[in-house]
């Protein structure tokens, strides 16, 4: 793999996403749900490790858990009681609740409560979240197609390797969207300045982002 | 290249609701298809006629326990294979196919456990409790295989008359506690065979009964209704055009894609939203055209989208249209003139106007108007263009300059965009500012009609027979299937359309990496492509 420049670059890029997630963590460092974000980032690192070791199924499984924990961080920010119950072991994380069209984190009600300017695009990002979660779930459930697509031995597999990075990139876009929609109007200017390059890189094409950023820095 | 479903036939009927993106218009159509009044659904290729029939069928199936309305889906796509000596072959075949489909559907739904006596009349003979191959199945199959032995005659002994058929369905309805049978007839009448159209609509009219609702999907060019069928009185005629002027048009088209696309493509669509909107507008409401162009531009960046629009709407969409003139020699002059009229007259006119309108920030156009007294051959040429989706009939009885009355058409936006140097940098503004109020008018004797009206080689009134044998000898690469499927057919040595039509699932399984499921799916896709190719 080390001889494959493209593969090395992909790994570096996915590794560098950790810097983005650190900035997100810093932006909400005083909030209770930050511990969930920390746990998510740890899972991302385990997934990266599994990927580098050629353990592709475990890399996809870890990636899905990372994604779920990152998004539930946002859900917990609005429902602290759920967070406390989860922390005490009396409530599970539920993907269906996360993406619920009426009450989930991409629902019109949720987005409008925190940043109505993002509501126009929320359905689209919800669809992406659902697709990438479903694709990783195939590895969790051991669907037949995953046995065909993954190598039987521990060897470098270009297709599986790049598919993982592709999903990691997609998740970063969705997470950045959900994070910006939830927190952008409420974090301090310093944290916002740190987040700006991340947001612009992932979802800077959205008119809502351009509007909010220009307003933030005018003030 | 993303592996999209381009045809409803490729989707399992019980999964059809998973792919359904419901607009208000779609809901109206599905409800109309489910209710008591007969409905005729009209739309170009690929707009989703079969899909909506399947949705209505599935919804009725899901509610059968409470409503007792029994749906039966029947495709007439195989009608192009009929070459027997029987002058009434199409009528007999239709009846046999309908009987056979009803028995199959009842059997599949588990309603023939006790085998009611009335089923014997429908089946053309005694039906055993296991309901194997019936006499009407054999009759239908014999007609469908008549292309192999063109001079053969088919024995129709056992085929019920229309009255027997209706009586039998009434008896079945009583015995099985069914309130109504709803027939969904797809690919109902062949666009280039007026005689088939007349026979179909006559049968459609004859099948009226309190316990039968007959629905059908037809192409826009179908106009020969026969002597007994009257379009407004005998059926509700519904057109299935998605309105490109509607504010949620792009969102709806995106949702259709979301049902099939992977996360990587969806992310690209989110990032290049404007480019996706351009592809959606170019498709002019036709999901199949959108999926096909999107499959060519999976990164959705400007370079890919520009290339996809240029290649698809300048070349491929026309290739399909022009192929029709090879199959139907009598229509050649008419089909070729239609292409020339759009490419050399209508599109340049519209483009010239839009260039001016955009400079002065005024509303734009993709509409043209044809006087109602225009020669019939010109109208026929426009009907063929509507069939292939190059134009869409937008409104009838429209007043133009000096109070003259005519029909307004929308030209396929992709064909209009393809004439721009770089579509992604200019056409979004055209699409967003479209208004039907601006239309280019072509009077009853417009000069551009002359090459057609003076042509002597047109023969549209004699029901031009399809040159079936010549089409079957064409190479298999003419079929509209995926490159992977083409590769597998070549691997198996299935080099002509005839070879593909003759191939069994067992034969297809001989290809590398093709198992039971893939062989079935591949055969379905290949046969659907063959039949679509043959039917024009």
Image (cartoon, rainbow, N blue to C red):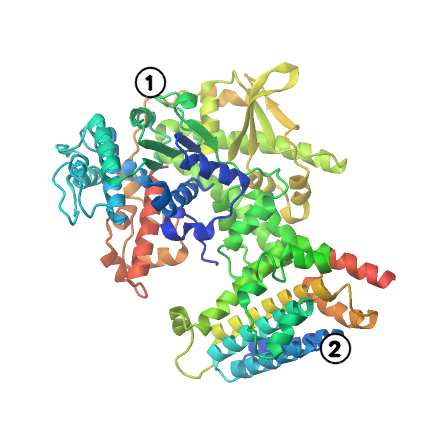
Kindly identify which residue carries mark 1.
Answer: B227
Which type of secondary structure does the marked residue at label 2 adopt?
A: loop
Query: Residue B160, image x and y in percent?
Result: 18, 31
Task: Name the mark on residue A68.
Answer: none
Q: Residue at x 47, y 46 (%)?
A: B288
Q: Mark 1 vs mark 2: give the one in front.
A: 2
Residue A217 lies left or right of residue A128; in this view the side is: right
Residue A28 lies left or right of residue B72; in this view the side is: right
Q: Residue at x 51, y 45 (%)?
A: B22
Instruction: Measure how far apart labels 1 and 2 are at the Cα level.
Output: 79 Å
Report the quarter where the C terminus of chain A lies.
bottom right
Residue B136 lies left or right of residue B426; in this view the side is: left
To which quarter of the image does residue B426 belong? top right
Q: Residue at x 36, y 55 (%)?
A: B486
User: Does residue B296 show up?
Assistant: no
Decide which of B122, B460 is in the foreground and name it. B122
Kindly identify which residue carries mark 2.
Answer: A29
Query: Residue B75, image x and y in percent?
Result: 32, 40
To which quarter of the image does residue B513 belong? bottom left
Q: Chain of mark 2?
A: A
Number of other residues with Cα within 10 Å of mark 2, as a class: few under 14, some 14 to 19, many 20 or more:
some
Query: Residue B144, image x and y in percent?
Result: 23, 39
Decide which of B497, B224 is in the foreground and name it. B224
Residue B531 lies left or right of residue B336; in this view the side is: left
Which type of secondary structure does the marked residue at label 1 adopt?
A: loop
Are callouts 1 and 2 both on one chain? no
Number of other residues with Cα within 10 Å of mark 1, as a class: few under 14, some 14 to 19, many 20 or more:
few
Q: Chain of mark 1?
A: B
Residue located farthest toward the right when viewing the structure as drawn? A219
User: Does residue B212 show up?
Assistant: yes
Depicted B498 relative to depicted A92: above or below:
above
């Amino acid at each position: 793999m080390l001889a494959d420049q493209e593969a090395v670059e992909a790994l570096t890029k996915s590794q560098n996403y950790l810097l983005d997630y650190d900035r997100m963590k810093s932006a909400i460092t005083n909030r209770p749900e930050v511990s969930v974000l920390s746990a998510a980032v740890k899972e991302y690192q385990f997934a990266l490790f599994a990927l580098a070791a050629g353990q592709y199924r475990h890399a996809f499984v870890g990636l899905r858990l990372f994604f779920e924990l990152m998004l539930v961080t946002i859900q917990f920010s609005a429902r602290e009681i759920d967070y406390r119950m989860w922390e005490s072991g009396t409530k599970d994380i539920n993907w269906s609740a996360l993406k619920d069209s009426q009450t989930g984190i991409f629902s019109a009600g949720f987005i409008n409560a925190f940043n109505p300017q993002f509501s126009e695009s929320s359905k689209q990002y919800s669809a992406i979240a659902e697709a990438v979660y479903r694709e990783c779930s195939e590895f969790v459930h051991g669907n037949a197609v995953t046995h065909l697509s993954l190598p039987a031995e521990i060897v470098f597999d270009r297709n599986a390797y790049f598919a993982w990075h592709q999903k990691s990139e997609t998740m970063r876009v969705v997470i950045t969207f959900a994070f910006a929609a939830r927190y952008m109007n409420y974090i301090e200017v310093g944290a916002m300045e740190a987040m700006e390059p991340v947001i612009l890189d992932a979802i800077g094409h959205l008119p809502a982002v351009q509007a909010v950023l220009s307003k933030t820095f005018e003030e | 290249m993303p592996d999209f479903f381009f045809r409803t036939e490729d989707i399992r009927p019980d999964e059809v609701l998973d792919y359904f993106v419901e607009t208000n218009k779609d809901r109206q159509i599905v409800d109309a298809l489910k209710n008591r009044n007969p409905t005729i659904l009209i739309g170009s290729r690929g707009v989703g006629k079969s899909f909506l029939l399947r949705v209505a069928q599935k919804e009725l199936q899901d509610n059968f326990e409470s409503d007792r309305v029994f749906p039966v889906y029947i495709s007439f796509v195989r009608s192009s294979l009929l070459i027997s000596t029987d002058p009434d072959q199409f009528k007999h075949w239709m009846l046999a196919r309908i009987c056979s489909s009803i028995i199959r559907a009842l059997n599949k739904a588990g309603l023939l456990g006790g085998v009611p006596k009335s089923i014997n009349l429908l089946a053309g003979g005694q039906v055993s409790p296991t309901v194997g191959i019936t006499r009407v199945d054999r009759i239908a199959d014999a007609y469908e295989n008549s292309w192999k032995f063109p001079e053969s005659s088919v024995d129709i002994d056992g085929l019920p008359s229309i009255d027997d058929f209706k009586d039998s369905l009434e008896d079945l309805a009583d015995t099985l506690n069914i309130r109504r049978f709803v027939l969904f007839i797809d690919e109902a009448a062949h666009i280039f065979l007026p005689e088939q159209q007349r026979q179909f609509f006559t049968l459609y009219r004859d099948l009226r009964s309190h316990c039968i609702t007959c629905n059908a999907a037809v192409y826009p060019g179908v106009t020969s209704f026969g002597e007994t069928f009257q379009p407004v009185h005998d059926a509700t005629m519904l057109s299935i055009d998605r309105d490109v002027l509607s504010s949620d048009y792009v969102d709806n088209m995106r949702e259709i894609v979301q049902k099939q696309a992977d996360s990587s493509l969806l992310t690209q669509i989110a990032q290049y939203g404007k480019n996706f909107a351009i592809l959606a507008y170019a498709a002019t409401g036709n999901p199949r055209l959108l999926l096909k162009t999107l499959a060519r531009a999976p990164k959705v960046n400007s370079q890919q989208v520009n290339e996809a629009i240029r290649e698809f709407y300048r070349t491929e969409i026309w290739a399909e249209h022009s192929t029709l003139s090879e199959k139907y020699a009598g229509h050649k002059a008419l089909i070729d003139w239609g292409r020339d009229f759009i490419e050399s007259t209508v599109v340049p006119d519209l483009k010239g106007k839009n260039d001016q309108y955009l400079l002065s920030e005024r509303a734009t156009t993709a509409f043209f108007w044809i006087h109602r007294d225009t020669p019939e051959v010109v109208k026929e040429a426009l009907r063929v263009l509507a069939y292939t989706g190059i134009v869409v009939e937008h409104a009838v009885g429209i007043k133009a300059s000096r109070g003259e009355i005519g029909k307004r058409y929308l030209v396929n936006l992709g064909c209009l965009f393809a004439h721009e140097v770089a579509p992604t940098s200019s056409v979004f503004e055209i699409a967003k500012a479209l208004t039907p109020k601006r239309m280019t008018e072509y009077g009853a004797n417009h000069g551009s009609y002359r090459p057609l009206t003076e042509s002597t080689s047109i023969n549209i009134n004699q029901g031009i027979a399809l040159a079936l044998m010549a089409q079957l000898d064409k190479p298999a690469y003419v079929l509209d299937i995926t490159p992977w499927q083409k590769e597998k057919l070549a691997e198996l040595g299935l080099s002509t359309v005839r070879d593909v039509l003759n191939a069994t699932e067992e034969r297809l399984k001989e290809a590398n990496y093709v198992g039971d499921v893939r062989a079935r799916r591949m055969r379905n896709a290949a046969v659907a492509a063959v039949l679509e190719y043959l039917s024009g």
